[in-house]
Image: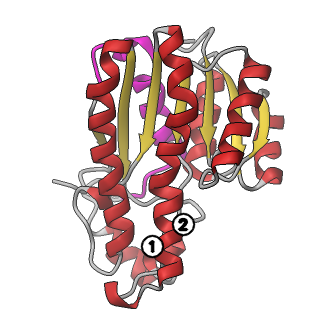
């Protein structure tokens, strides 16, 4: 119950890593807003763990503002924010990615961090405390070819995490990131291009522990970084990757 009495918003929590984080937070005693562009997915997870379901487009300022207002009304306060929602383009040469695909990747992976900060940081400043966790990727630390603009968006997120941490520390707000390797999530097929036993084996050969990240792995790391046990930790990008970045 390390998060007992805490409230949290987890974006992209209707599936994958976000659902794993939401489940772990609830198990540790937090009241969770399960936020996702897929309302049905958010409601499914909410029925499992309790809390509040919220449909949100994290790349849209009005939608993020509505989510924040709903969270404050339903939860009373916002102690923890997890920016987990993300997207990618398919593997291809960097010059072949369309402008629309580029814009979508940076809107969902980067602009969303700005939009949630714009709405929620003032509330955390007023409270004198808060924890923000950005779900980045090993792609932002040790990029693979043909995912250029996705890699760049996650590198942006890691830099944003560090500068947010420095600026917000005097206000009692900690900001960290986790960097998972690919896992069994809806984005896995997109990362690999196609899902075949051969491509999986090749992908797994780059992970020393020999398996993909799981939602439970992300939940465990996120719960620690957002708990009071990590009160001296801010500005880190924790690799939860089975040794992928070594």
- Residue 220 among those drawn in magenta: yes
Q: Residue at x 58, y 33 (%)?
A: 119
**Residues drawn in magenta:** 211-234
Q: Residue at x 38, y 12 (%)?
A: 172
The tag on residue 187 is 2
Give the total number of marks visible in the rendering.
2
Q: Nearer the viewer, residue 152 or 210?
A: 152
- Can residue 240 be seen by looking at this rendering? no
Q: Position of residue 87 (x, y in %)?
A: 53, 64
The tag on residue 191 is 1
Quadrant of image for the N terminus: top right
Q: Residue at x 59, y 19 (%)?
A: 28
Task: Say what secondary structure mark 1 lies in.
Answer: helix
Q: Is residue 203 left or right of residue 9?
A: left
- Can residue 31 be seen by looking at this rendering? yes
> Is 245 situated above or below 196?
above
Q: Nearer the viewer, residue 114 or 22?
A: 114
Determine whether label 1 and label 2 are within 8 Å by CB. yes
Q: Position of residue 93 (x, y in %)?
A: 33, 88
> Is 98 situated above or below 121?
below
> Is 170 situated above or below 10?
above
Q: Residue at x 28, y 14 (%)?
A: 232
Q: Is residue 173 left or right of residue 50?
A: left
- Residue 193 among those drawn in magenta: no
> Is 204 situated above or below 125?
below
């Amino acid at each position: 119950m390390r998060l007992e009495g805490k409230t949290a918003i987890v974006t992209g929590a209707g599936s994958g890593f976000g659902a794993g984080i939401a489940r772990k937070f609830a198990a540790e005693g937090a009241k969770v807003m399960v936020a996702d562009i897929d309302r049905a997915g958010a409601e499914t997870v909410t029925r499992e763990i309790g809390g509040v379901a919220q449909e949100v487009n994290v790349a849209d300022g009005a939608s993020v503002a509505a989510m924040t207002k709903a969270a404050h009304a339903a939860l009373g306060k916002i102690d923890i924010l997890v920016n987990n929602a993300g997207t990618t383009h398919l593997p291809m040469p960097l010059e072949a990615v369309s402008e629309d695909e580029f814009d979508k990747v940076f809107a969902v992976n980067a602009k969303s961090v700005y939009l949630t900060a714009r709405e929620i940081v003032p509330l955390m400043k007023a409270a004198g405390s808060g924890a923000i966790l950005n779900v980045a990727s090993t792609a932002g630390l040790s990029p693979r070819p043909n995912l250029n603009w996705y890699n760049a968006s996650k590198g942006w997120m890691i830099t944003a995490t560090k500068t947010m941490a420095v600026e917000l520390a005097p206000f009692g707000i900690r900001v960290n990131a986790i960097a998972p390797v690919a896992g069994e999530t809806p984005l896995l097929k997109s990362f690999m291009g196609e899902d075949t036993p051969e491509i999986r084996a090749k992908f797994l050969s780059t992970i020393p522990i020999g398996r993909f990240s799981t939602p439970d792995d992300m939940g465990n790391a996120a719960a620690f970084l957002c708990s009071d046990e990590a009160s001296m930790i801010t500005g880190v990008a924790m690799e939860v990757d089975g040794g992928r970045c070594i």
